Image (cartoon, rainbow, N blue to C red):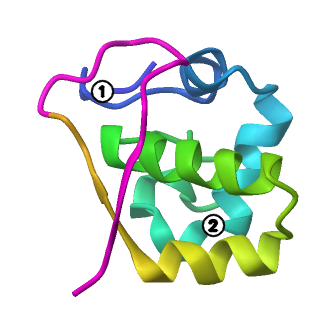
Amino acid sequence: MPDNPSLLTVGQVAQELDLSAQSVRRYAHEFRDHLGPDANPGHGATRQFTPEDVQVMRAAKRFLMSGLTYEVTNERLDLVSIDVPSDPPPTASTAVDLQPLQ
């Protein structure tokens, strides 16, 4: 269980995004450059995800579900900023607002 109540575990993120825990871990690895440091801690440490990390993974899932590869998804994530609502509802259907970087 995360020490900080605003941080989520792999299981909580999996439920939020309707993904398997294994997929959440893969997303954390594949999209590590777009996530906070607690998403990929050192060996033996528990992964913890911020609301911003969840929004990045939600956007990545959407890109991947549209047929993009992990490589292209990473490139797309470089080109967008992800707006995180101040109090997002805890549902898998929460929309991601992707805005081009200025």
- Residue identified by numbered label 2: 31
Pick the residue in front: 16 or 12.
Answer: 16
Q: Residues within 10 Å of mark 2 (few under 14, many from 20)?
A: many
As helix, strand or loop, the secondary structure at mark 1 comes to loop
* Tag 2: amino acid: Phe
| Sequence-wise first label, 1 or 2 | 1
Gap in angstroms between the C-alphas marked 1 and 2: 23 Å
Residue 76 position in % (x across, y down): 58, 76
Residue 26 position in % (x across, y down): 79, 52
Residue 44 position (above or below residue 42): above
Which residue is at a point 19% across and 35% down the rendered structure image? 85
- Residue identified by numbered label 1: 3
Q: Residues within 10 Å of mark 1 (few under 14, many from 20)?
A: few
> Magenta part of the protein: which range?
86-102
Which residue is at a point 45% across and 82% down the rendered structure image? 79
As helix, strand or loop, the secondary structure at mark 2 comes to loop
| Side of 23 relative to 48 (left or right) | right
Which residue is at a point 78% across and 54% down the rendered structure image? 64
- Camera-side mark, 1 or 2: 2
- On the rendered image, what quadrant is the C terminus found in? bottom left
